[in-house]
Image: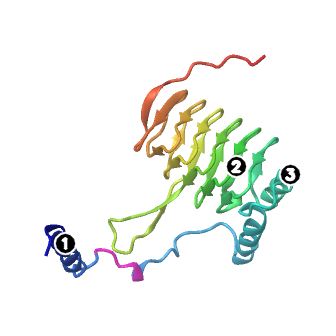
Amino acid sequence: MPPENESVQQAASQSVEQSDKPSWLDLSSYSNQGYAPGRGKIIRAAWHVVSLLIFESGWFPFRRPKVWLLRLFGARVGCGLVIKPQVRIKFPWRLTVGNHCWIGQSVWIDNLAEVCLGDHICVSQGAYLCTGSHNYRLRSFNLVTRPMMIENGAWIGAKAVLLPGCHVGANTIVGAGSVVRQPVGPEEIVAGNPAESVCYRCEPRTSK
């Protein structure tokens, strides 16, 4: 048998041996009974349908009806919101959006806890705002949620990931593809996984 085939066979046998190890997690004991989604089953079911048909689909590009629907389901939305197609919002009643914000295509706002966006914020395509995780120290893998705040003038780059509890300061830039786990200070530019400070912004010129 060629040496490369022997190494593949050994790796496969080791994988089988490892699969016999007992799991440290017991997902059969998981329960989210301590978590309150904030609305009853009927409202949540109605939002699920509206989200699939209007927000997550690509065929409905009109933003004004979307803003109206968000407010109808309890979101606090300022003026001038631009929201692109294929946006996922877990619970609109746990969303606050300031004035003149942009939410790009395929953004996922997974707001099991409160997400608050200030004024003039750009959340670019494919960004993921995550407020929920799990307690891996418990066998039952309990749900853990933490709110998120993004202050005025921040720009969240395409496909960036913001993890639970993130607080992004005013006028900050989070680079494309970055993973933010810690608070980001005002006017800071961060990038990478995990996101680290690159430099600080200067106040931009007024466009002519």
Q: Name the residue under label 1.
A: 5
Residue at 40 percent of width and 43 percent of height: 194
Residue at 19 percent of width and 72 percent of height: 5
Distance from label 2 to label 1 (Cα)? 57 Å
Q: Is the magenta stretch mostly helix, strand or loop?
A: loop
Q: Do the residues labelled 2 and 1 touch (CB within 8 Å)?
A: no
Q: Mark 2 points at which residue?
A: 96
Residue closest to the eye, 111 or 102: 102
Secondary-structure class at tag 1: helix
Residue at 68 percent of width and 53 percent of height: 95
**Vertical placement of 159 versus 19: above or below?**
above
Q: Image quadrant for the C terminus?
A: top right
Q: Give the range drawn in magenta.
A: 24-28
Q: Is residue 186 magenta?
A: no
Q: Name the residue under label 3.
A: 64
| Horizontal side of residue 196 vs 85, given as left or right | left
Earlier in the chain: of badge 1 and badge 3, it is 1
| Horizontal side of residue 156 vs 15, given as left or right | right
Residue closest to the eye, 116 or 198: 198
The outermost residue toward the front is 2
Secondary-structure class at tag 3: helix
As shown in the figure, which amino acid type bears the numbered disc 1? Answer: Asn
Earlier in the chain: of badge 2 and badge 1, it is 1
As shown in the figure, which amino acid type bears the numbered disc 2? Answer: Thr
Q: Image quadrant for the N terminus?
A: bottom left
Residue closest to the eye, 87 or 149: 87
Residue at 70 percent of width and 49 percent of height: 96
Mark 2 vs mark 1: give the one in front. Answer: 1
How would you rate the neighbour count of disc 3 (Cα within 10 Å): few for under 14, some for 14-19, many for 20 or more?
Answer: few
